Image (cartoon, helix red, strand yellow):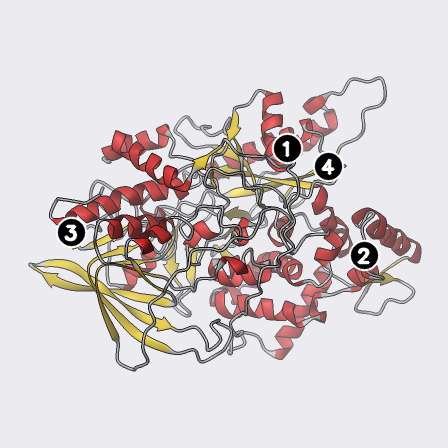
Amino acid sequence: MMPDLVTPHVKPSPTQLPPVPLNDPFTPAQWKTFLALADTLIPSITPRSTASSKQLGVADAEYSTVLTTIEHVALQGQQNEEGLAKRYLAEVPSSYPAFQAGLLRFAGFYMPQDLTKQLALLLNLLDILFRRTWIASSPTFYNVLSYPRIPVHGVPAKGFEFSFLQIPPGDAPEVIETDVVIVGSGCGAGVCAKNLAEAGYKVIVVEKKVHWESEHLPMSEYEGFEHLWMQYGGIFADDSSIAISAGEAWGGGGTINWSASLQTQGYVRSEWAKQGLPFFTSAEYQHCLDTVCARMGVSADYIEHNKSNDVLLSGARKLGWSAKAVPQNTGGKAHYCGTCTMGCGSCEKQGPVVSFLPDASRAGANFIEGFNVEKIIFKTIHGVKTATGVSGLWTARDEYGGVSLPNRRTRPVIINAKRVVASAGTLQTPLLLKRSGLNNPHIGRHLKLHPVTFIGATFDEEIRPWEGAILTAVVNEFENLDGKGHGTKLEATTMIPSIFLAFIPWKGGLDFKLTAPKLKKMVGHISLARDDGEGRVYQDPNNGIVRVDYTPSKKDKRHILEGAIATAKIQYVEGAREIFTIIPGIPIFTRKDVPAGQEDPGINDPEFQAWLDLVRKTGFPSPDCIFLSAHQMGTSRMAASEKMGVVDSKGKVWGTEGLYVADASVFPSASGVNPMVTNMAISEWISRSLAKSLKGGEAKL
């Protein structure tokens, strides 16, 4: 049952964005083409009798019908300003500056340069980019959708007041001394900082991004993609086969994840132990899992499932499939929030910013924001390559305490330390190791992504799927399709409009503008593979951004497809009116009412079965079909020897002293579950081992 609404009417404070790139990647003529493509994909729709050559003119009678649909169906019974529906239909992306500025941020800062020269691949990106940026920046769409810009559930709360070291002006490098420097502030970093500070060591946590207090959260999509997500929320593989979302914020991925707190499963732990890492089947590892979960108040006892998650549990039960609630890291409280992927303003989600980093601060740890670590400093001591610190560039906030003004003060910084912990995440840690001169061939390899596909459904009733906890249920019936621990899990996904709607089937501008407001009646699910295939991550030689070389394997695609078909069956038995995939060429399945007096055939409906057969036959055609990922693992993998991986069983980088890695990049293979808890548990173990190395075998933990 949906809880009573709590509407605090407190609008999150807006943030200022940094300047757009000074070096425009496109000429004026290219911009004209770029924006014309956007206006074609999302056209201005008017009656044919008054349409200009740049507008999509429809027959006057059809326009009247469309207008009535928007006014009386999409806006059913709601207060709306005069002419809103007409302005919504007439609007084009190029008519307001925020749209072009959003494109410029993505293309100027984050799009790999060689992709701009490969038109065939670029067109795959443009479809998603135009729709996502239009939705995030549109002045009318959220009003048409009745999507609240102020969260309707939960009460804003004041977060922990962090104090960040300020670097004085100067040209020469500022030199700082500490026991341990931790690069990154995410899930692994937070656990390490807490444990090492509480053990009595001097700890400095450094983060490239700045901290945004809870009063700014949740951010709008337009702000959040810049401030909280890596590379504006869209890292595309070199062949555009997969779009990757990763956190890049104070708190890392723990700031934008969905609270799902699943422990490492037994068959995965056994797999890792058989690779020469017996710790994973020990009672000590279970203790590490339980310790981090206890700190975050992980529990499934207080969950109130929204429609998307309830559909999974109820549908799986009707079909006889295994499913369960997903524990949440919400401090033993109900947390009916669907916007945490843009930051949690209630401070109920116990990510690093709310839990481990405040603990570290209370134990004496120091923090530096705006510090981009360029390399790890090594010295040869007793013939061994030994990490002695890090160096990089610190950038101050602007004079108003933000990041929007140009010419912010910078200064080189060197931090000398007895131990260095790389916790920059699966995508950034291997780049740091390579920039620092390490040449282990496994660095950056063995990338696992948990590739997913979307399966959506539209119901007759209004759902408001952006309300309620995002991911509170999982169907695990299909998690071991190959008998070796590889398969797919079925879960709910975020229904933030610009994320979900960017991937729904596009059949034309008018169809998209009619379909998009239906989001209020939709549910969204994913089929998530524990991937057997793998890829690599590397640094773009031109602008330094993250590049990914990864294509989902045929085996993993088969598993994802089985999960997609199973999800469609769940949606059908739960009464969905329409069911759709993001596979190009697959039509939307529309359910017909069963005639009076006839028995409902359920999933054996011949038309539904024919549609499923078409989905199975079509599969995922390359290169037109795109996958998605929000989990990254394995690029500095833990192994029993240097020949097999990057770090040893205690997180120390092979061939070095004083250098450790503590993040999801050390996973020996894909975790098969949302990686936060596994990441934290391994970091719990690594930080304890590191403390012992500092104390000469005696830790205070």
In this figure, which residue is indicated by the disc labeled 4? 459
Residue 434 place in picture, x, y as percent = 29, 60
Does 171 appear above or below 543? below
Check residue 568 in the rendering and tell me which mark sits there, or answer none.
Answer: 1
- Number of other residues with Cα within 10 Å of mark 4, as a class: few under 14, some 14 to 19, many 20 or more: some
> 209 left or right of 179?
right
| Measured Cα–Cα span from mark 2 to mark 4 | 24 Å
Marked residue nearer the N-terminal end (2 or 4)? 2
In this figure, which residue is indicated by the disc labeled 3? 694
Marked residue nearer the N-terminal end (1 or 2)? 2
Which numbered mark, 1 or 2, is in the foreground of this view?
Answer: 2
Q: Quadrant of residue 163?
A: bottom left
Marked residue nearer the N-terminal end (2 or 3)? 2
The amino acid sitting under disc 3 is Leu
Marked residue nearer the N-terminal end (3 or 4)? 4
Could you tell me which secondary element the residue under label 1 belongs to?
helix
Which numbered mark, 3 or 4, is in the foreground of this view?
Answer: 3
Could you tell me which secondary element the residue under label 4 belongs to?
loop
Residue 325 place in picture, x, y as percent = 52, 31
Asked whether residue 134 appears in the rendered view, the answer is: yes
| Measured Cα–Cα span from mark 3 to mark 4 | 59 Å
Marked residue nearer the N-terminal end (3 or 1)? 1
User: Residue at (30%, 50%) from the top-left corner?
Assistant: 194
| Measured Cα–Cα span from mark 1 to mark 2 | 35 Å
Marked residue nearer the N-terminal end (1 or 4)? 4
| Measured Cα–Cα span from mark 1 to mark 4 | 13 Å
Front one among 249 and 433: 249
Q: Kindly indicate whether the residue at mark 4 contacts the one at mark 3 (C-beta within 8 angstroms).
A: no
Residue 402 place in picture, x, y as percent = 48, 71
> 633 left or right of 89?
left
Residue 531 place in picture, x, y as percent = 43, 39
The amino acid sitting under disc 1 is Ala
